[in-house]
Every structure is written in structure tokens, then in C-alpha cells.
Image (cartoon, grey):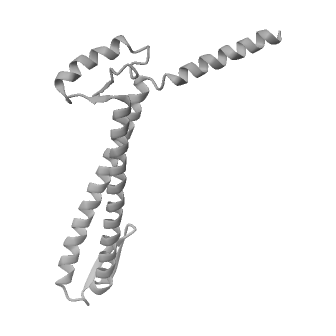
Amino acid sequence: MAANSSSTGSKTSSSGGGGKQSGPSAEQVVATFQRMRQEQRNMASKAAELEMDINEHSLVIDTLKEVDPSRKCFRLVGGVLVERTVKEVLPALENNKEQISKVIETINTQMQAKGRELTEYRERYNIRLVGEGEGDTQGQSAAPSGNSEGGGSKSGAGVLVS
């Protein structure tokens, strides 16, 4: 009995270990790569949105600098329109603009790190994008389809991502 259960345990552990050694499937590699690319796109989109906010802040700041400091102006704070004077609003706008610039710098740093991570991931799994090296891509796209069950990413065939 003891021999029977230990052999079953060794079969289970060896088959489980063998599956982990082959690495992630091509679908998992592509899904992870697509998720990472989407994260980078989201960061770029947020950075562009914040750049537009900085441009709007700059326009308003430039306009308010030419106005009498005691003049009344309105500012939207948390969805509520508040009446203030130019001399109260101008420093707050300049501070907001600086804070937005810092956030953009942080996002750009994160985007560069994500770009390096994507490049390393592409090299590790030999990922080729559609339209990248048109002559090479044709031969590689056929190779993984015949070799998809046997861990095609280890054979050097690569993964084609659209």
C-alpha cells in the first residue's frame, strides 16, 4: 500500500513539475504581452491628458496675469463654482500646474520602465509584432502553428502578436 501511494505521489509531482518547466503557453505569453502594452498605452493616454491640463492652466495663468489682482473671478472647486479674486486664484493655479508637471514626470518614468520591461519580455519569448520584419514574420507565423503543443516558445519559433 505504501509503495502504491508513494508512486502515485511521485507521478503527480513529476507531471506537475514537468508542466511548469515548459513555461507559459503561447496564449499566456501573448495575453501578458498585450496586457503590458495596454498598461503602457493607458499611461501615455493619461500623460497626454495631463499635458492638455497644463496647457489649459498656462492659458488661464497668462490671461489672469494681465488682469487687475482685485478683480473677481470664478473657479470650479470639486464641482462647485466659487467666487474669488484673481490674487487668490493665481497662486493656486500655478501650484496646480507644478503638481501636474510632477505627476507627468512620474508617469513618464513609469512608461520608460514599462517600455524596458516590454522589451525584455519580447526578447525572452521572441515575440514579433505584425508588420515588423515582413520577410521574417511570414516564416515564423507558420512555425508555431505546427508546434503549438510542444512549447513553441522554446524552439525559437517565437510568438506573433497582432
The single residue placed furthest to the right in the displayed view is 1
Residue at point 60% right, 16% down?
Answer: 15
Check the picture and name the quadrant holding the C terminus: top left
Relative to residue 134, is residue 109 drawn left or right?
Answer: right
Residue at point 21% right, 66% down?
Answer: 55
The one nearer the camera, 127 or 106, is 127
Q: 72 above or below 153? A: below
Q: Quadrant of residue 101?
A: bottom left
Residue at point 26% right, 55% down?
Answer: 48
Check the picture and name the quadrant holding the N terminus: top right
Q: Quadrant of residue 73?
A: bottom left
Q: 120 above or below 142? A: below
Q: Number of marks in the image?
A: 0
> Where residue 156 sits in the image (x, y, percent)?
34, 22
Q: 5 above or below 40? A: above
> Where residue 23 sits in the image (x, y, percent)?
48, 25
Q: 139 above or below 160? A: above
Q: Quadrant of residue 4?
A: top right
Residue at point 23% right, 28% down?
Answer: 130
> Where residue 39 sits in the image (x, y, percent)?
37, 44
The one nearer the camera, 20 or 76, is 20
> Where residue 88 sits in the image (x, y, percent)?
33, 84
